[in-house]
Image: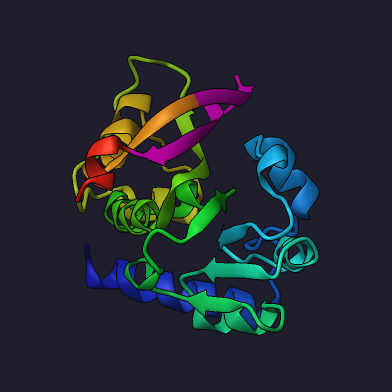
Amino acid sequence: MSLDYENWKQQNWDRAHRESDITALTGTGLEGHLTTLRVRNLLIPGASVLCVGVGMGKWVLETAEITDRVWALDISHVAAVRMPKNSNFTTDPQKLPPNHFDLAMSLWVAPHMSNHDLQEQVTGVVRSLKPDGVFAVHYKEPLDPNAQLDNREGASDEFSIAMSAMMLRRRKHLASMVSWAGGEVICTVNEQVSQFYQIIEAVAHIKKTSKSLRR
């Protein structure tokens, strides 16, 4: 990963949180997350929940009204100011507690992430799931199955694509990332198809594999 990309990534999201930039941070509430990610039945009182990407904080605060066991993972330490009292926050997916979460939710985050960063995140989140926990993640697929995607680490266009939240991943590519992390995609649904942008807005539900549970 280039130094320029790393500098932009940190500075961009720190600025967005300091300035409450609604063009960069999602203001979607909890209802929007539960509906899009199809996990309404999994968010119950007492559940241990991981919110991936704090955004404007609305959905995290609303989650804390249902359960008092809330963590958040965000690239920017500035996002911590949006967290409810008695919650937990980290910028490092490897510092998430192992075997801890009943539910992890990620909406409008993965399309902003490079392959390297997403792999690190998926690995940390899968490790942090309980044996029956679910990681629901929204991502974008190319509508054209024959579209050429350059998924090489450090590809020349990776920086600009991640900036515009248009990092596309084939279904098999995401599944391989999840498998490498010790998980499996148990289902994938297409939430929306955009003919104009030639993309599919997809949601995958991820669980640990039986093999990873024996580690």
Whether the magenta-drawn stretch holds residue 189 is answered as: yes
Provide residue 127's location: percent of width, then percent of height.
33, 55
Residue 198 in view, yes or no: no
| Dominant secondary structure (helix, strand or loop) of the stretch shown in magenta | strand
Residue at screen point 67% across, 78% down: 83
Whether the magenta-drawn stretch holds residue 167 is answered as: no
How many numbered circles are shown?
0
Provide residue 36's location: percent of width, then percent of height.
68, 37
Tell me which corner region of the image, top left, top right, bottom left or bottom right, holds residue 1. bottom left
Q: In this image, 162 relative to 181: left or right?
A: right
User: Which is nearer the eye, 173 or 200?
Assistant: 173
Residue at screen point 46% across, 71% down: 75
* Stretch in magenta: 188-208
Quick check: 137 above or below 9?
above
Provide residue 170's location: percent of width, then percent of height.
36, 28
Provide residue 78's location: percent of width, then percent of height.
56, 83
Residue 104 in view, yes or no: yes
Q: In this image, 27 relative to 190: left or right?
A: right
Quick check: 108 above or below 176?
below
